[in-house]
Amino acid sequence: MAIQGIILDVDGTVILASKVLDGASETLDILRNRGYKLVFCTQQNQDSDRKLSDRLNAAGLQIYEQEIVSAGTVAVDYLAQNHRGSQVYVVGADSIRDRLSLAGLKVLADRNGETAEVVLVATDPDVNLTRLSVAAEAVRRGADFYVTSLDRGEPMADRIIPGPGSLALAIAYTAGRRPVVLGKPSPAMVAAVRDRLQLPSSSIAVVGDQPAQDVRLGRFLGATTVLVMSGVTTPEALERTSSSYRPDVILPGIKDVPAWLDLNKQKQPS
């Protein structure tokens, strides 16, 4: 079946270190003009989808709020649906705490965090040993344990800070329990993008720069997987990648996607 919907990663695919990648804006225009349904799937968890859309538009990319599926929003929606009314301790930014509160969860302060029923780990620019130890104790006592993604690091303006995966690993190692991942390529994220596109798996392509996240997301969806070499994956790293994470297609960057789609369309039976 011909491709009708495209799931695009954000960091490393259309933007890198706050800079729009070569040909990204023009490519999005081409894809929309040709009638493809677009979803931007990101591990970002600090900003709301509205703020993320505003930031991307300010950078020069026309991306609408309703096209974004972020790990932060998936996490908030998942906890609101499965733990509504529960006491939650968050290792993360104030923004995700506020969103959880608005969704009907009781977010605990550090002094009460050890009694939490749920622990969520996200990006936390102000993380400290107290916050990690409180989260670990809550998990050790039996709190449900979630992380927005297993990203090891996240770029800031002047440095890279430990990502949710690094923080969750410290908590998991201390408490002796592994977290449930809610971002790519989890079942929760798969369900979110599938619901947004409303298309058969065979008509979807996933385009991203990380085999362990984007290619696996595509595999779980049953979609065509396209790896772009504009982000964190190097040719050497790709050579070492497990065969189960290998993409169907490898392209230099997003600007090469329209030509690949044309070629793919020509191969479809008439």
Image: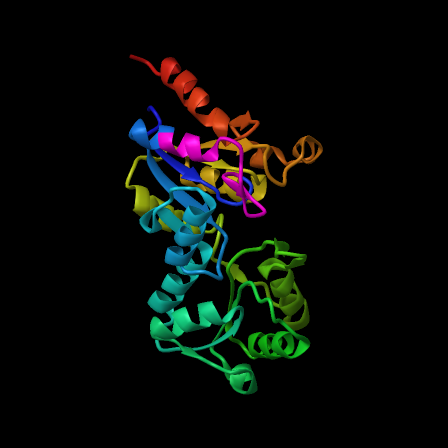
In the rendered image, residue 27 lying in the magenta stretch gets the answer: yes
Please state if 235 lies on the left or on the right of 22 as rendered: right
Q: Is residue 266 above or below residue 20?
A: above
136 and 154: which one is in front?
154
Where 226 sits versus 19, above or below?
A: above
**Residue sitting at x 28%, y 41%:** 198
Q: Quadrant of residue 101?
A: bottom left
Residue 68 at x, y percent in the picture: 38, 49
Q: Is residue 167 left or right of residue 214?
A: right
Residue at image location 63% in from the left, 37% down from the top:
233
Residue drawn where x is 69% and y is 34% of the image: 240
* Residue 231, percent from left and from top: 60, 39
Residue 191 visible in image: no
In the rendered image, residue 74, in percent from the top left (x then y), is placed at 40, 58
Q: Is residue 100 visible?
A: yes
**What's the residue at 60%, 64% (across, down)?**
168
Q: Which residues are magenta?
A: 13-29
The percent position of residue 207, horizontal first and vertical second, equals 47, 35
